[in-house]
Image: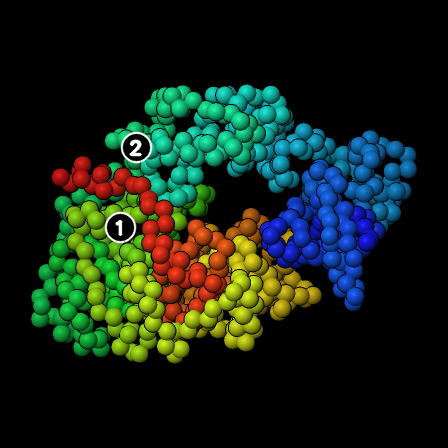
Amino acid sequence: MQIYKGIYTKAIKKTNCDYPSVFTLTTSQGRNIKCAGQGNLYAIGTPLEVEGTWTEDNFCFRITKVEVTDEDGPLLFQFFTKNMGLKNKQAVKLQALFESHKMYDYIGQKDAVAKIAVVLEKKEDETKQFIEDLKSQKAIYDLMDDLKDTNCIYKDISKIRKAFGNRSESVIRNNPYVLISKCKLSFEKADNIAKKYGKEANDEERLRYMVRKAFELVMAQGHTRATLRMLGKKMYSISKHSAYPDYLFNKITITDMLLSSKEYVYKDGFFYLRKYYRMEKSIANNIRRLQNTAVKYLLPDSKIPLIERKLGIQFDESQKKAITLIRNGGLCILTGPPGSGKTSTIKGIMEGIYCVKPNAQIRLAATTGCAAQRMLEQTEMYASTANAMLEPLPETQLVPSRNRNNPLEQDVYILDEASMADTELIHQTFEAIPDGALVILVGDEHQLKSVGPGKVLHDLIESGVVPVYRLNCLHRQKNGSLIPTLAQTIDQGSKQLQIDNKSVYLYNFQTAEQARKYLEMMFVKKFKKEDYKTYSFLSFVKKGEAGCEIINRIIHNLNFEGKPGFTYDNVTFCRNERVMFNRNNAKTGYCNGDMGIVESYDAEGMYILMDFGKHSKESVYICGDDLDDIEIAYTKTVHKAQGSEADYIILLIPDYAPTMLRRDLLYTGVTRAKKGLLVLNVRDSIYRCIDNAAGVPRETGLQDRIKEIMF
């Protein structure tokens, strides 16, 4: 057995402790050792002592034992690399030099310059300047020293210092919970700081933020309201993982706090965050407003054959009926399964509107960038995300400039993939739509619900006050594809799956690793940089042995290991790398779910070639904080894929994430495919998905608000 000491500097294969981990250990001599074996994930910069043996070819060091040698190590390492601009090897060596000394005492010694110069491989005058720079950072180092045992990382400390400056120490001692809202610190970290500085478990400020955290967890499950029991369960869970795990909170105290606070509304046995109560009420009011001011497009039945000839489309009876929804005006819903002709029907609706009002202004939008791009390609009319349509203020990227006081100006609004629209987006959209407008929500109610709180499309359909037009003929099935039939079978909860080994394939595996390796082989065999619209690789999960993160990292290594690129946050992006954006940013010009290719890079950022379909391609420059919004994306989760399509889908369903094995997730993944579908199924995962119809039912108050206002 051999033993090495060093710093955890690079995660090569990020997994949890149930699977082998591979990482780089950098010793104080600057040697990089590739380690493999059982081990946890560590923060970059964590000092470790590893024990094990070398493989026969000396390719990697197989570890049998790992110990953290210094809990404060990651902070110091991050201080050197992120604040002082040192490279990993320099930071490791300097950390070793200061190991048994207080850093600011050490740099005052006579021989400090000479020793630090050797470590940094710098000239004497450069080293003196480095020490002066180090002295100028003493305030942030002292703050780091104060918070070293609270699980805060260097990024947290930097945010605190930026927000409060010289008042940082006073803030963390007197009211650390304010860091949650001001610096985006987690409740758990704020709790650790509070305990360190003597705050009691029943501190009023602590309980207030604990209730907020409970509401956050409730809303993360899609609810817009909660019973006291629901909140109590979340608070119990928070307490068990807090700095005071044995504290038993008083339900009466919590109830009084909820009832007396202006942040919450209590109605009919449910507590609401006031903002969500107001948004649901606003949606109901706007439905009534749109109905009361509706402009009706009285299209004669005789015009529909003319529309068919113009478009070259033969509509079925349900499509013909749906086209006549324009006669209602106000708000309408168009729904139907994949392959039922929703896009063709939208074209027919637009032609019908132009027949009645040739100069009508129609605005197309969708909930995701992928869906907006698809609308543009299929209708050859401009389409954007709903967020972009609302023209968010540049300084926030969140607050729309379009609202009741500054409404939009078109006559008709068609919003695609409406099942993904959460309560806030629908509220903002309805607020910006002018009186007399026709609003058409298009979506498949059986697909995934929104990531944010609410189930708006479902609630509007169930309310009975909004006209709903359902398409029921599967046109894609006429082309010989079994994909729509399979989707219908899944939606009905049947396990009699249609597999023809022509359009639908099902391959079974015993382990997630086997399925992942097959997907990687498929990628190498089938996927080229220009083929991401032809083939799309999806996984149910982001983490773990069959998650997108590890698959993307492995495929990146297969294609680009050892090649130069732009490195940010320990991830290297190379030229021709496939990437995806994970947030909306109207100022820079990208949306959540947009895909692109790394075209080139410089010292500060990257040029990403964005693909907006056959109509346009353009480069955007990504730098600074925007770099947090980009990730490698050879494969993506089903959630991220909603709103997009590809000719051929390879769908991986692992067996280790039971909460993700849901019917709606399977249905959504299957319906992304147009021509061919290959399902990589681990054990009985696909059948567990079919059995799990509900997931967690969402509690919302929208139907109640509609009944109050409309009846």
Mark 2 or mark 1: which comes first in sequence?
2
**90 and 45: which one is in front?**
45
Residue 539 visible in image: no
Q: Nearer the viewer, residue 565 or 698?
A: 698
Q: Is residue 420 above or below residue 97?
A: below
Which x, y percent locates residue 254? 40, 24
Q: Residue at x 23, y 53 (%)?
A: 439
- Residue 81 versus residue 445 in the image, above or below: above
Amino acid marked by disc 1? His
**Residue receiving disc 1:** 458
111 relative to 692 in the view: left or right: right
Q: Which residue appears at 76% of the width and 34% of the height?
A: 135
Query: Which of the 4 quarters of the picture holds residue 102?
Result: top right
Q: Which residue is mark 2?
A: 270
**Which structural element holds mark 1?**
helix
Q: Is residue 492 visible?
A: yes
